[in-house]
Image (tube, rainbow, N blue to C red):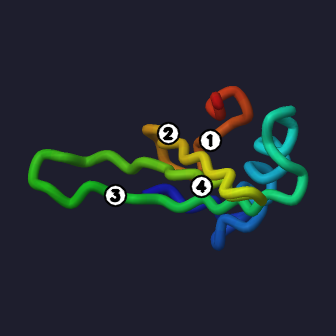
Amino acid sequence: MFVNPRDPDNKIITGKILEWVLTFDEIPRDARVAAREVTCNDPGCNHTDTYITIEGPNAFKKELMIRKPLVYIRKWDIVL
């Protein structure tokens, strides 16, 4: 797995994902956004997915799965 030497704890990219998610009009401004990586451990399966969970008031919840590692996520990958 690639680790960005300038952001080994992924704090910068996670902050950017939060910014990008909050640019969508349908997302409440006080929503909580969490991003996590999940690596497939099955034999012959060597990919890492990123899951983004968005939770807001009034039971608002949205989950996204992007089929790439967290460090490779860019604004255009986030499609609601």
Tally of marks: 4
Determine whether the residue tagged by mark 4 lies in a helix, strand or loop: strand
The residue sitting at 87% across, 59% down in the picture is 30
The residue sitting at 79% across, 42% down in the picture is 27
The residue identified by callout 3 is 39
Task: Say which amino acid is labelled 3.
Answer: Thr
Query: Which mark is first along the chain, 3 or 2?
Result: 3
Single out the residue that lies furthest toward the left: 43
The residue identified by callout 2 is 66
Lateral position of residue 68 relative to residue 43, left or right: right
Query: Which mark is first along the chain, 1 or 4?
Result: 4
Residue 62, given in percent of the width and then of the height, sits at 60, 46
User: Can you tell which quarter of the image residue 33 is in?
Assistant: bottom right
Of the numbered discs in the image, which one, if any, rests on residue 52? none
Q: Please state which of residues 45 and 52 is positioned toward the viewer in this rendering.
A: 52
Q: Nearer the viewer, mark 2 or mark 4?
A: 4
Mark 2, other Cα within 10 Å: few <14 / some 14–19 / many ≥20: some
Q: Nearer the viewer, mark 2 or mark 1?
A: 2
Mark 3, other Cα within 10 Å: few <14 / some 14–19 / many ≥20: some
Give the distance between the C-alpha atoms of the residues marked 4 and 3, in whole angstroms.
17 Å
The residue identified by callout 1 is 73
Of the numbered discs in the image, which one, if any, rests on residue 53? 4
Give the distance between the C-alpha atoms of the residues marked 2 and 3, in whole angstroms.
12 Å
Give the distance between the C-alpha atoms of the residues marked 3 and 1, in whole angstroms.
15 Å
Give the distance between the C-alpha atoms of the residues marked 2 and 4, in whole angstroms.
11 Å
Residue 21, given in percent of the width and then of the height, sits at 77, 43
Asked whether the residues under the numbered discs 2 and 1 touch, taking CB atoms below 8 Å apart as contact, a structural biologist would say yes
